Image (tube, rainbow, N blue to C red):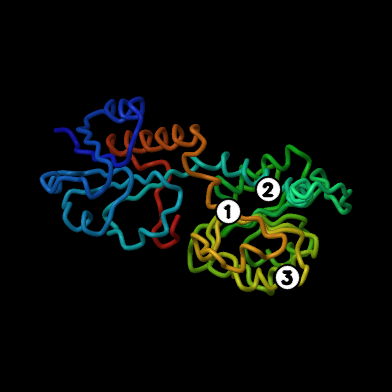
Protein backbone atom coordinates (compact mmCIF):
# COMPACT_ATOMS: atom_id res chain seq x y z
CA UNK A 1 0.00 0.00 0.00
CA UNK A 2 1.35 3.43 -0.95
CA UNK A 3 2.16 6.02 1.69
CA UNK A 4 0.27 9.28 1.13
CA UNK A 5 2.56 12.31 1.00
CA UNK A 6 1.30 15.89 0.74
CA UNK A 7 3.79 18.43 -0.62
CA UNK A 8 3.01 22.12 -0.05
CA UNK A 9 4.24 25.14 -1.97
CA UNK A 10 4.66 26.16 -5.58
CA UNK A 11 7.17 23.91 -7.29
CA UNK A 12 8.73 23.54 -10.71
CA UNK A 13 7.69 20.63 -12.87
CA UNK A 14 11.21 19.21 -12.50
CA UNK A 15 10.85 19.21 -8.70
CA UNK A 16 7.36 17.72 -8.85
CA UNK A 17 8.75 14.89 -10.92
CA UNK A 18 11.38 14.18 -8.25
CA UNK A 19 8.62 13.82 -5.67
CA UNK A 20 6.50 11.68 -8.00
CA UNK A 21 9.39 9.22 -8.38
CA UNK A 22 9.49 8.50 -4.64
CA UNK A 23 9.19 4.72 -4.16
CA UNK A 24 5.91 3.42 -2.76
CA UNK A 25 4.29 6.83 -2.43
CA UNK A 26 1.13 8.61 -3.49
CA UNK A 27 2.06 12.28 -3.78
CA UNK A 28 -0.43 15.15 -3.64
CA UNK A 29 0.59 18.75 -4.33
CA UNK A 30 -1.12 21.75 -2.73
CA UNK A 31 -0.12 25.42 -2.62
CA UNK A 32 -0.71 25.92 1.11
CA UNK A 33 -1.64 23.92 4.19
CA UNK A 34 -5.13 25.43 3.98
CA UNK A 35 -5.58 23.78 0.58
CA UNK A 36 -5.32 20.26 2.00
CA UNK A 37 -8.65 18.46 1.64
CA UNK A 38 -10.18 17.10 4.89
CA UNK A 39 -10.76 13.90 2.92
CA UNK A 40 -6.97 13.36 3.00
CA UNK A 41 -6.59 13.86 6.76
CA UNK A 42 -7.16 10.25 7.80
CA UNK A 43 -4.54 8.51 5.66
CA UNK A 44 -1.81 11.13 5.17
CA UNK A 45 1.47 9.85 6.60
CA UNK A 46 3.95 12.52 5.51
CA UNK A 47 3.83 16.29 5.07
CA UNK A 48 6.57 18.08 3.14
CA UNK A 49 6.76 21.82 3.66
CA UNK A 50 5.40 22.25 7.18
CA UNK A 51 2.52 21.54 9.51
CA UNK A 52 0.18 23.38 11.86
CA UNK A 53 -1.56 22.27 15.05
CA UNK A 54 -4.91 21.62 13.40
CA UNK A 55 -3.43 19.22 10.88
CA UNK A 56 -1.27 17.47 13.47
CA UNK A 57 -4.34 16.93 15.65
CA UNK A 58 -6.52 15.69 12.78
CA UNK A 59 -4.08 13.45 10.93
CA UNK A 60 -3.93 10.29 13.05
CA UNK A 61 -1.44 8.57 10.75
CA UNK A 62 0.97 11.49 10.34
CA UNK A 63 4.45 10.22 11.17
CA UNK A 64 6.94 12.51 9.42
CA UNK A 65 7.18 16.22 8.62
CA UNK A 66 9.87 17.54 6.28
CA UNK A 67 10.49 21.29 6.39
CA UNK A 68 11.79 23.31 3.47
CA UNK A 69 13.40 25.74 5.90
CA UNK A 70 16.51 25.42 8.06
CA UNK A 71 14.78 27.05 11.03
CA UNK A 72 12.64 24.73 13.11
CA UNK A 73 12.33 26.49 16.45
CA UNK A 74 8.56 27.03 16.05
CA UNK A 75 7.78 23.31 16.19
CA UNK A 76 8.43 22.50 19.85
CA UNK A 77 4.71 21.73 20.22
CA UNK A 78 4.80 18.90 17.67
CA UNK A 79 4.01 15.51 19.27
CA UNK A 80 7.08 13.35 19.81
CA UNK A 81 5.77 10.44 17.74
CA UNK A 82 5.98 12.64 14.62
CA UNK A 83 9.54 12.82 13.30
CA UNK A 84 10.61 16.30 12.17
CA UNK A 85 13.44 17.10 9.75
CA UNK A 86 14.58 20.44 8.37
CA UNK A 87 16.51 21.41 5.24
CA UNK A 88 19.81 21.23 7.11
CA UNK A 89 22.77 22.06 4.90
CA UNK A 90 20.81 23.31 1.91
CA UNK A 91 21.36 27.00 2.62
CA UNK A 92 24.81 26.93 4.24
CA UNK A 93 27.01 27.88 1.30
CA UNK A 94 24.67 30.60 0.03
CA UNK A 95 24.37 32.28 3.43
CA UNK A 96 28.14 31.97 3.92
CA UNK A 97 28.65 33.85 0.64
CA UNK A 98 26.40 36.64 1.95
CA UNK A 99 28.45 36.72 5.16
CA UNK A 100 31.69 37.01 3.19
CA UNK A 101 30.19 39.83 1.13
CA UNK A 102 29.21 41.96 4.11
CA UNK A 103 32.44 41.14 5.96
CA UNK A 104 34.55 42.50 3.12
CA UNK A 105 32.13 45.38 2.62
CA UNK A 106 32.60 46.48 6.23
CA UNK A 107 36.36 45.87 6.28
CA UNK A 108 36.91 47.97 3.16
CA UNK A 109 34.43 50.70 4.22
CA UNK A 110 32.46 50.28 0.99
CA UNK A 111 29.16 51.74 2.32
CA UNK A 112 30.99 54.99 3.08
CA UNK A 113 32.45 55.10 -0.42
CA UNK A 114 28.96 54.55 -1.85
CA UNK A 115 27.66 57.46 0.21
CA UNK A 116 30.64 59.50 -1.00
CA UNK A 117 29.79 58.70 -4.62
CA UNK A 118 26.20 59.79 -4.12
CA UNK A 119 27.39 63.24 -3.01
CA UNK A 120 30.14 63.25 -5.68
CA UNK A 121 32.86 63.39 -3.07
CA UNK A 122 36.51 62.36 -3.33
CA UNK A 123 38.18 61.37 -0.08
CA UNK A 124 40.58 58.56 0.82
CA UNK A 125 39.38 56.71 3.91
CA UNK A 126 41.98 55.30 6.28
CA UNK A 127 41.78 52.40 8.73
CA UNK A 128 40.86 49.81 6.11
CA UNK A 129 41.14 46.23 7.32
CA UNK A 130 42.84 43.29 5.62
CA UNK A 131 40.92 40.04 5.41
CA UNK A 132 44.10 37.99 5.24
CA UNK A 133 45.41 37.49 8.77
CA UNK A 134 42.23 38.72 10.43
CA UNK A 135 40.74 36.74 13.30
CA UNK A 136 37.20 35.59 12.68
CA UNK A 137 34.91 33.94 15.22
CA UNK A 138 31.81 32.02 14.17
CA UNK A 139 29.30 31.72 17.00
CA UNK A 140 27.37 28.75 15.72
CA UNK A 141 29.08 25.90 13.91
CA UNK A 142 26.29 24.29 11.95
CA UNK A 143 26.28 24.17 8.17
CA UNK A 144 26.26 27.98 7.87
CA UNK A 145 29.00 28.85 10.36
CA UNK A 146 31.20 25.99 9.19
CA UNK A 147 30.89 27.03 5.54
CA UNK A 148 31.68 30.66 6.40
CA UNK A 149 34.85 29.70 8.27
CA UNK A 150 35.94 27.32 5.52
CA UNK A 151 35.66 30.09 2.95
CA UNK A 152 37.27 32.63 5.28
CA UNK A 153 40.21 30.32 5.94
CA UNK A 154 40.70 29.88 2.20
CA UNK A 155 41.10 33.67 1.95
CA UNK A 156 43.71 33.73 4.69
CA UNK A 157 41.75 34.45 7.88
CA UNK A 158 42.54 32.77 11.20
CA UNK A 159 39.31 31.07 12.22
CA UNK A 160 37.73 30.29 15.60
CA UNK A 161 34.44 28.65 16.46
CA UNK A 162 31.89 28.44 19.27
CA UNK A 163 29.37 25.63 19.48
CA UNK A 164 27.10 24.21 22.16
CA UNK A 165 29.30 21.15 22.65
CA UNK A 166 32.89 20.80 21.47
CA UNK A 167 33.42 18.00 18.98
CA UNK A 168 34.76 17.42 15.47
CA UNK A 169 37.01 20.47 15.17
CA UNK A 170 37.62 21.12 11.46
CA UNK A 171 41.24 21.43 10.36
CA UNK A 172 40.67 25.03 9.22
CA UNK A 173 39.58 26.13 12.72
CA UNK A 174 42.35 27.32 15.04
CA UNK A 175 40.33 26.86 18.22
CA UNK A 176 36.87 25.47 18.95
CA UNK A 177 35.18 26.16 22.27
CA UNK A 178 31.80 26.00 23.93
CA UNK A 179 29.91 29.02 25.28
CA UNK A 180 31.95 29.04 28.48
CA UNK A 181 35.05 29.98 26.48
CA UNK A 182 33.49 32.58 24.20
CA UNK A 183 34.02 35.68 26.33
CA UNK A 184 37.78 35.07 26.46
CA UNK A 185 37.92 35.04 22.65
CA UNK A 186 35.77 38.10 21.94
CA UNK A 187 38.41 40.77 22.73
CA UNK A 188 40.82 39.22 20.19
CA UNK A 189 38.44 38.95 17.25
CA UNK A 190 38.23 41.23 14.21
CA UNK A 191 34.91 39.71 13.13
CA UNK A 192 32.22 37.95 15.17
CA UNK A 193 29.61 36.17 13.06
CA UNK A 194 26.37 34.82 14.52
CA UNK A 195 24.49 32.00 12.79
CA UNK A 196 22.55 30.79 15.82
CA UNK A 197 19.18 29.04 16.00
CA UNK A 198 16.39 30.60 18.04
CA UNK A 199 16.53 29.01 21.50
CA UNK A 200 16.27 30.18 25.10
CA UNK A 201 20.03 29.78 25.34
CA UNK A 202 20.76 32.07 22.42
CA UNK A 203 18.17 34.78 23.14
CA UNK A 204 19.86 38.07 24.14
CA UNK A 205 23.26 36.37 24.06
CA UNK A 206 24.93 39.52 22.76
CA UNK A 207 23.95 42.21 25.22
CA UNK A 208 25.86 45.42 25.92
CA UNK A 209 28.42 43.62 28.07
CA UNK A 210 29.39 41.20 25.31
CA UNK A 211 29.28 43.82 22.58
CA UNK A 212 31.73 45.93 24.57
CA UNK A 213 34.00 42.93 25.10
CA UNK A 214 34.63 43.07 21.36
CA UNK A 215 37.38 45.28 19.97
CA UNK A 216 36.31 48.83 19.18
CA UNK A 217 37.17 48.26 15.51
CA UNK A 218 35.54 44.83 15.23
CA UNK A 219 32.66 43.84 12.96
CA UNK A 220 29.61 41.87 14.09
CA UNK A 221 27.38 39.95 11.66
CA UNK A 222 24.06 38.28 12.33
CA UNK A 223 22.34 35.86 9.93
CA UNK A 224 20.74 33.54 12.49
CA UNK A 225 18.02 34.94 14.72
CA UNK A 226 17.50 38.63 15.39
CA UNK A 227 16.94 38.21 19.13
CA UNK A 228 20.48 36.90 19.63
CA UNK A 229 21.49 40.59 19.83
CA UNK A 230 19.76 43.00 22.22
CA UNK A 231 18.67 45.71 19.80
CA UNK A 232 18.65 48.64 22.24
CA UNK A 233 22.09 47.66 23.51
CA UNK A 234 23.47 47.49 19.97
CA UNK A 235 22.09 50.95 19.18
CA UNK A 236 23.70 52.36 22.31
CA UNK A 237 27.06 50.73 21.58
CA UNK A 238 27.13 51.87 17.96
CA UNK A 239 26.19 55.45 18.84
CA UNK A 240 29.07 55.46 21.32
CA UNK A 241 31.45 54.71 18.45
CA UNK A 242 32.20 51.15 19.55
CA UNK A 243 32.47 48.55 16.74
CA UNK A 244 33.37 49.27 13.13
CA UNK A 245 30.12 47.85 11.77
CA UNK A 246 27.07 45.72 12.52
CA UNK A 247 25.83 43.83 9.45
CA UNK A 248 22.35 42.51 10.13
CA UNK A 249 20.35 40.21 7.89
CA UNK A 250 18.08 39.41 10.84
CA UNK A 251 16.96 41.74 13.59
CA UNK A 252 14.53 42.15 16.45
CA UNK A 253 11.81 43.16 15.71
CA UNK A 254 11.40 41.81 12.19
CA UNK A 255 10.32 43.14 9.77
CA UNK A 256 11.94 46.27 11.14
CA UNK A 257 9.22 48.95 11.39
CA UNK A 258 9.54 52.23 9.57
CA UNK A 259 11.17 54.93 11.70
CA UNK A 260 12.77 52.37 14.02
CA UNK A 261 16.02 53.90 15.35
CA UNK A 262 18.08 50.95 14.08
CA UNK A 263 17.55 52.18 10.50
CA UNK A 264 19.57 55.32 11.17
CA UNK A 265 22.06 54.03 13.72
CA UNK A 266 25.58 54.80 12.47
CA UNK A 267 27.52 51.94 10.85
CA UNK A 268 24.59 49.52 11.02
CA UNK A 269 24.01 47.87 7.64
CA UNK A 270 20.67 46.13 7.18
CA UNK A 271 19.44 43.58 4.63
CA UNK A 272 15.85 42.30 4.87
CA UNK A 273 16.49 38.63 5.76
CA UNK A 274 17.69 37.74 2.27
CA UNK A 275 20.84 35.67 2.83
CA UNK A 276 18.95 32.38 2.51
CA UNK A 277 15.66 31.61 0.82
CA UNK A 278 15.15 30.83 -2.85
CA UNK A 279 16.48 34.08 -4.31
CA UNK A 280 19.46 32.05 -5.50
CA UNK A 281 17.98 29.30 -7.66
CA UNK A 282 20.60 26.81 -6.53
CA UNK A 283 19.19 27.06 -2.98
CA UNK A 284 15.80 25.82 -4.16
CA UNK A 285 17.33 22.85 -5.97
CA UNK A 286 19.34 21.91 -2.87
CA UNK A 287 16.27 22.16 -0.61
CA UNK A 288 14.29 19.86 -2.89
CA UNK A 289 17.17 17.38 -3.06
CA UNK A 290 17.46 17.34 0.76
CA UNK A 291 13.70 16.81 1.08
CA UNK A 292 13.59 14.02 -1.50
CA UNK A 293 16.58 12.29 0.12
CA UNK A 294 14.92 12.39 3.54
CA UNK A 295 11.55 11.22 2.21
CA UNK A 296 13.25 8.30 0.45
CA UNK A 297 14.99 7.29 3.68
CA UNK A 298 11.78 7.48 5.72
CA UNK A 299 9.80 5.50 3.14
CA UNK A 300 12.49 2.82 3.39
CA UNK A 301 12.19 2.68 7.18
CA UNK A 302 15.36 4.70 7.89
CA UNK A 303 15.80 7.96 9.83
CA UNK A 304 16.22 11.22 7.88
CA UNK A 305 19.66 12.76 7.53
CA UNK A 306 19.03 15.44 10.15
CA UNK A 307 16.25 14.95 12.71
CA UNK A 308 15.28 18.12 14.56
CA UNK A 309 15.59 17.98 18.34
CA UNK A 310 12.50 19.90 19.43
CA UNK A 311 14.01 20.72 22.83
CA UNK A 312 16.90 22.50 21.08
CA UNK A 313 14.96 23.90 18.13
CA UNK A 314 17.35 22.57 15.47
Which residue is located at x 21 percent, y 36 percent? 28
Task: Find residue 205 and report its horizontal and vertical position in percent.
Answer: 59, 68
Q: Among all residues in the image, which is located at the extreme front? A: 120
Which residue is located at x 81 percent, y 43 percent? 132
Mark 1 is surrounded, within 10 Å at the Cα level, by few (under 14), some (14 to 19) or many (20 or more) other residues, namely: many
Q: Secondary structure at mark 3?
A: helix
For the question of whether residue 107 can be seen, the reply is no
Task: Find residue 261 and report its horizontal and vertical position in percent.
Answer: 61, 69
Question: Looking at the image, is mark 2 or mark 3 nearer the viewer?
Answer: 3
44 with respect to 150 (left or right): left
The residue indicated by pointer 3 is 239
210 with respect to 55 (left or right): right
The residue indicated by pointer 1 is 249
Mark 3 is surrounded, within 10 Å at the Cα level, by few (under 14), some (14 to 19) or many (20 or more) other residues, namely: some
The first of marks 2 and 3 along the sequence is 2
Which residue is located at x 72 percent, y 58 percent? 245
Amino acid sequence: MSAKIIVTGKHTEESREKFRRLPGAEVIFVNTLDDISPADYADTEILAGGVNRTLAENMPNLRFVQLFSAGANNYAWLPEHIVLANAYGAYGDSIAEHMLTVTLMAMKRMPEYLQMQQRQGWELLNNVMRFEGSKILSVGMGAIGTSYLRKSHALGAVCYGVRRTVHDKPDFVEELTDLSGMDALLPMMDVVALSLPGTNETKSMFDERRLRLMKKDAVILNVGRGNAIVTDDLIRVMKDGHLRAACLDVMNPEPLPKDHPLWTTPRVYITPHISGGYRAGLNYSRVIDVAVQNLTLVLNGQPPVHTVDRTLGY
